[in-house]
Image (cartoon, helix red, strand yellow):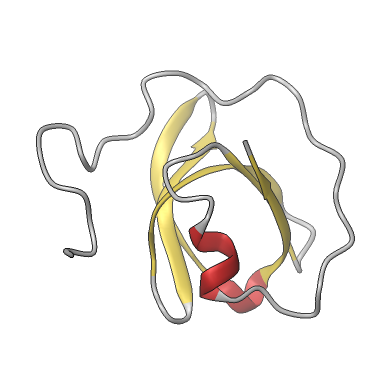
Amino acid sequence: MPPFPQGPGAHQPPASPPPSFIPQQQVSAYAVDPGSIAGCLFRFTYIWQTNRDQYWFYPIFVGRTSVSGYRFFGGRWNYYGVDLRKISSFTCY
């Protein structure tokens, strides 16, 4: 299976903005592994980073040490990637 979905629009950001609420942060483990965040692929995901940054994210690829997708910033989706070690917790919808 290819690492990315195929077909028209497969690598496009979501057509709509993320939910209008900020979810409650859950107690998390010490590290985020690729298998745990892979369940959030192509879903609205809220991320809390270890540096206290937090944002809506739409992951499209999970690698061994990082995740990439689209971050909602300034009212639009921008392509973005983050090291899994910099994520303290996440939740997806």
Q: Residue at x 49, y 61 (%)?
A: 38
Q: Is residue 39 left or right of residue 20?
A: left
Can residue 62 be seen at all in this image of the molecule? yes
Q: Position of residue 18 (x, y in %)?
A: 57, 26
| Tally of marks | 0
| Closer to us: 65 or 40 | 40
Q: Is residue 5 left or right of residue 80?
A: left
Q: Residue at x 54, y 35 (%)?
A: 73
| Closer to us: 36 or 80 | 36
Image vertical order of residue 64 relative to residue 1, above or below: below
Q: Where is residue 42, by image quadrant?
A: top left
Image vertical order of residue 55 relative to residue 18, above or below: below
Quadrant, the N terminus: bottom left
Q: Where is residue 57, by image quadrant?
A: top right
Q: Position of residue 32 (x, y in %)?
A: 65, 73
Q: Position of residue 2 (x, y in %)?
A: 17, 63
Q: Check the image and name the residue furthest to the left.
A: 7
Q: Residue at x 20, y 40 (%)?
A: 10
Quadrant, the C terminus: top right
